[in-house]
Image (tube, rainbow, N blue to C red):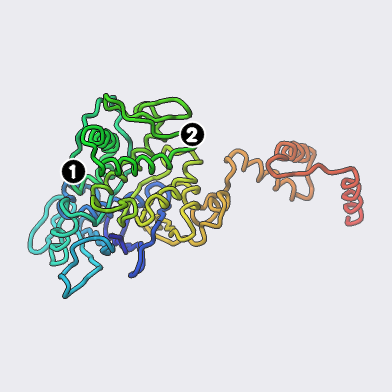
Amino acid sequence: MWVEEVSLENIKSCEKMTIRFGSKEAPYKWVTLLGENGGGKSTVLQSLGLLLAGPEGVNQLLPRPVGWVRDEDKTGKLSIKIHQGDNDPNTFGGDARIRKSFGYTLFLTGNRNITIRNKIYTEPSIVENKDKILTWLRQNALNSKEKGWFAVGFGAFRRLTRVSQILVPSLQTPQRFTNFLTQFNENEPLAAFEQWLVYLDYRISKDKDMLAKKHYELGIDAISQLLPKGNKFDSVTSEGKILFNVNGQIVPTIGLSDGFRSVLALGGDLIWRLLEAFPESNDPLKEEGVVLIDELDIHLHPIWQRDIAGWLRKQFPNLQFIVATHSPLITISAGEDAVTYKLSIDENKATKIEKIEKIASMNVDEILKSDAFKLISSYSPQIQTKIDRYYSLQRKPNKNNAEEADLFGLQDELKPILGIKEKSPLDEKIEKFLAEKLL
């Protein structure tokens, strides 16, 4: 499964907006959403999460959509167009009518009286647009029992549990809506990664389960490639604790830094859910699906920010990633085929969207000053004020003694920053000669 487009109408800061995530033939494999805080990035990702969770999952994730409708005298709308992947089962209509593209809509109401299909809604609600396609999707694709049709969403506060605990070797099959829990509940830990490793370790040691061994090795290999050089998975103890080798020191997961824990939570949870969605696959990490990630850069050192997009694309080459970030490093390292959108608020306090071109060829300083971020200066405000003062004095034709002294002081201070070269005695004589002759 992959997403072709999503439309938001009368939702939070969005009056009416459509974002494309692929053509009619193929998905954009990596889509980056940029924008200042409050620009609508999380709203787009949460809207996608609700639509991909399916009708049964919507009310579990967002029982009362308080604050979602922009103008409460009107209905809010969330619409999506998704495509069936090559390996997704259950073709619509059987052999006689092969359909690969599906679209459906959810209606949202606020606190004002709104009538939908002759029924009055007096408080915030989410209402299905009931039709044959949605009925088919509910029964054959967007539910917990069907395999394939994979989608998962991660909120900004993804983390392993902070509670020191002994894990028992058991694991429950997830319901589809749980794939998106962290997008709507920032306190929800991604504990399945640890439980999954302990469970597989138990199955291998007790039952000599070869499928468990295969999944265990597949997951450990993928996780180990994510960690910086000198860090790797170590073992699962008999007490159910997971240990990592961090620069030669054996550390349990609860003792890892927030950056490590954030990456392990994301990578481990994604791997586990792929294995659950594609149990019969020879390589579940190569299957198709959609992954939503809010603020991918959070807790990550710049080195990881520069590498993580490439790692995710390498480990999961057929997944479609839709990612929000504030990091220029993640933006430029996603690949030349990545698509970048910038969301911003216009003069009507509504979200507008623009596509940013040629991101991959820029360096960090260039992208910060481009339309993607529109940063006025990459220097601190204090240093930039001094630079502006220096050039202002340099251009001034008649400087008094105080200004001359200020200019020379700034020149001396800013030499390392602006690459100002010392003037040789000959340069000074030439400048003096030219000044006299020109005057």
Q: What amino acid is labelled 2 in the image?
A: Gly
Along the line of sight, which residue is nearer the eye, 114 or 398?
114
Q: Residue at horizontal 29%, vertical 24%? A: 164
The image's mark for residue 173 is 1
Along the line of sight, which residue is nearer the eye, 133 or 394?
133
Q: Which residue is mark 2?
A: 230
* Image x and y of residue 242, in percent: 32, 30
Secondary structure at badge 2 equals loop
Near mark 2 (Cα within 10 A), the count class, few <14, some 14-19 or many ≥20, is few
Between discs 2 and 1, the one toward the N terminus: 1
Q: Is residue 176 left or right of residue 335?
A: left
Q: Is residue 39 left or right of residue 9?
A: right
* Residue furthest out toward the left: 118
* Image x and y of residue 93, in percent: 15, 70
CA gap, disc 2 and disc 1: 34 Å
The image's mark for residue 191 is none
Near mark 1 (Cα within 10 A), the count class, few <14, some 14-19 or many ≥20, is few
Q: Residue at horizontal 24%, vertical 57%? A: 149
Q: Nearer the viewer, mark 2 or mark 1?
A: 2
Q: Quadrant of residue 155?
A: top left
Q: Residue at horizontal 25%, vertical 25%? A: 166
Q: Quadrant of the C terminus?
A: bottom right
Q: Is residue 405 visible?
A: yes
Marks 2 & 1, CB-CB < 8 Å contact = no
* Image x and y of residue 116, in percent: 12, 62
Q: Is residue 379 left or right of residue 4?
A: right
